[in-house]
Image (tube, rainbow, N blue to C red):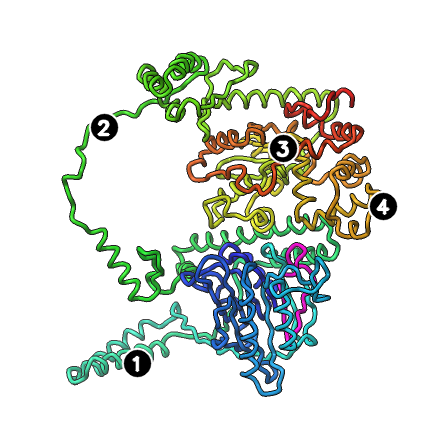
Amino acid sequence: MVSININGLRGKKLELQAYLQTENPDIVALQETKINNSIATNELIPDTLGYDIYRNDRTGNGGGTMLLVKTHLDSAPVKILENGSESIWSKIVLQGKQHYIGSWYRPPDAPLDQIQLLKDQMDKIKKLGKANKQPCIHILGDFNYRKINWRTKLNKDTNTCLNGSDGQALIDILNEASAEQLILFPTRESNTLDLLITTLPGQFTDIHSPDRLSDHDIVMGTLRCTIPRKIRPERTSYQYSKGNYNQMRDDSRDFTRDKYFNGHQNNRNVEENWIMIKEFILETTKINVPTKILKGKQSIPWINKNIKTMIKRKNRTHANYKRNNSMRIKRKWQELRRNINKEIELAHNNYVNNLIGDIKQDSKPFWKYINNQKADKQGIPPLKTHDNKTADTDQQKAEALNTQFTSVYTETKYESVPYQTPPVDKMINIIVTTKALGHKLGQMWRMMKFRRWYGSLVAILLFPSIVIVLYSVVSVPVSKVKLRLIPNEVQTKSADKIFINQNNQLVNLTEIRQFRYKSLLSSCEQLKSKGLVQNSITKKSLSHIIVDDRYKVLFCYIPKVACTNLKRVFLLLTGKMNATDPMALKAADVHLTYDKYLTYLDSYTEEEVQFKLQNYKKIIMVREPFERLLSAYRNKFTEKSPYFHKRFGRKIIRRYRNNPKQEDIELGKNAKFDEFVRYITDPVTIETEGLNEHWDLYSSLCQPCLINYDFVGKYETLDDDIDYIMHDLGIDTFIQFPKRGAAYKKKRTKDTFEQFYSNISKLDLGKLWKTYRQDYKLFSYAYPDIIKAADDF
């Protein structure tokens, strides 16, 4: 038995099909399928896999459960257990006993009353069985109880008794039903959310997590029993290509002459005539067309032996990672997972392309595949009506179509048709130079200052040549207009692009970009002359560069530099997200579940890497290094982040705190900022462990002296830089980059900078400066105010 929180079945159908084909589990419980009744089941899980499928779709967004049971188990749905909960049940008979199997989903914010629906279901099952007999119940699902320690049945954070909403109500239900929960390991981060509940705990073996298809681990257990094999009926298939059609024509002439038109045809009614014709056709087909016996083939044609081998290897790697909690093994598992997903998609595309290529010779396989992908077996799929309801039945579809046709066939009113004028040539592009605009702005500024609204109106009338550029600026009171001054040292002779950002500010990003670009080149030349630049691009850097082939862009992501929001944008560009707003993608899903949809440069061959580096636009975003370091500390050590607490917090407290409490060492939650700084600057850390990507150097993550980045953006001017990039790529018309501040719950990092760094000793500040000074030099950041004189270090 397998339980999978799939978190959106449509986007993972190929991955799930490959898993089912390879592992071939008997029973699969799915949660958070996020589908509705407009999507046919065989569109997601083909009949060839050999499952009876039961589903319970949520009416609104999200949620939904599904249960897959192998056809040889002879299952049946249990309608009496439907009670409004997000669950689906089936019944199978094993060794003379009825086993009830359920797939359950409880949302995180569900009220306490909802879990009582599970008690109602278990009570009904008990009544269905024999008196004084323990029923066989197996429940797999995501219950979203984060605080339960299933070994002690206590609150895992406080080691005290639970209250009802924290999971005590579920424990009471299990105790009353003499059932046990068998999953004792975390299934999502440090929480055991996905459960396997049974009244036969002694018959379950090999309980483990083989892999994950979303942000939840898969849960698997084996029920020891004897499974009766269901005999599949043989199917007769006619070989029409080998039929004796000459004999069939002769038989047809004899039939029409001797039997049909025998003088009694007018005495028979239509039904009798039809039966006579049908029986003749079936009889002559049986005699003249050879047949063969078919046994159903339960497989997916594009899942080949190589994919099955890779999936098994991935499962072994995931099990090794769960045992050792090694980041090296985790990265290897993630790489295998990305490669498998690409291999599955490639195999599927090749299969479809081959079908299309052979359609002239034999179109049957192609149309068979198309029919299996239909969302509805009927001619017209479910429709959306004008009041946003779904029309499922034939009558509802007919009414919806009638309403639509009536609305579009209206009487034409010719008086509203505009008079057609002769065609006019398009206006040529306006090129505005810095020098010319500066002169005009000076005159307009004096007029606007003198008469605010009236002055600006006169200025527009006098200088119409720049009215398009300045429209969004002069349409607000002058007191609210902010004109950004361009530094004299970054003036350029070429015609510069003037960009109006979303705050109605004039920005010359061409000049700023050139200044950053030249400054980076100059700094790299100095570092190369001192032998401080690596000879070749590392795999770590390639694994940090996101590739978008459609827009021909490479982006080197750096954690804590708007990384999550930028990844959201690139995920939307893949076209595989069921969203148009970047903020609709949860942050945790961006870095875990959805990461497989992004393509990284390390997945290409060496020749392909060189081609993309030479021909694609290359973008890097950076941030004031000390501020980024503080942001990483606040996010990973002062907020809930169990992995960083265990991986780094324990180590930091043990090494750098005098007389630490045992509780602090075990939890690793309250590592202080000065201890964190000492850990980063410790030579032992740098030599033996290296720096984590959240506080590693820009020169190490993205290697700007070896990769010639076309655009260097900065967090300090993030809004302007992102506006420029998205406008340059042509994606600003359909993607809105999230505004900074929308997701902030606490003070911003720059507001707490002095508070944290004022407690760092001068010695540790000096070590920290030496660690990050290369990043300061490369990207023209002045040394921080907290360091009075950088030369002292």
Question: Looking at the image, is mark 4 or mark 1 earlier in the sequence?
Answer: 1
Residue at 48%, 64% (x, y): give it. Answer: 46
> Label 2 belongs to which residue?
423
Question: Looking at the image, is mark 2 or mark 4 earlier in the sequence?
Answer: 2
> Label 3 belongs to which residue?
750
Magenta extent = 179-199
> Label 4 belongs to which residue?
659
Please indicate whether residue 162 sits to the left or right of residue 380 in the image.
Answer: right
Residue 32 covered by magenta stretch: no
Could you tell me the amino acid type at mark 2? Pro
Mark sitting on residue 260: none
Could you tell me the amino acid type at mark 3? Lys
Residue 607 shows up from this direction: no
> Label 1 belongs to which residue?
279
Instruction: Report, in whole angstroms, how far the alpha carbon at label 4 lies from the one at label 1.
Output: 95 Å
Q: Quadrant of the C terminus?
A: top right
Labelled pair 2, 3 in contact (Cβ < 8 Å): no
Please tell me how crowded label 3 is: few (under 14), some (14-19), or many (20+) other residues with Cα within 10 Å.
some
Instruction: Report, in whole angstroms, how far the alpha carbon at label 2 lies from the one at label 4.
Output: 85 Å
In x, y percent, where is residue 126?
57, 81
Residue at 68%, 64% (x, y): give it. Answer: 208
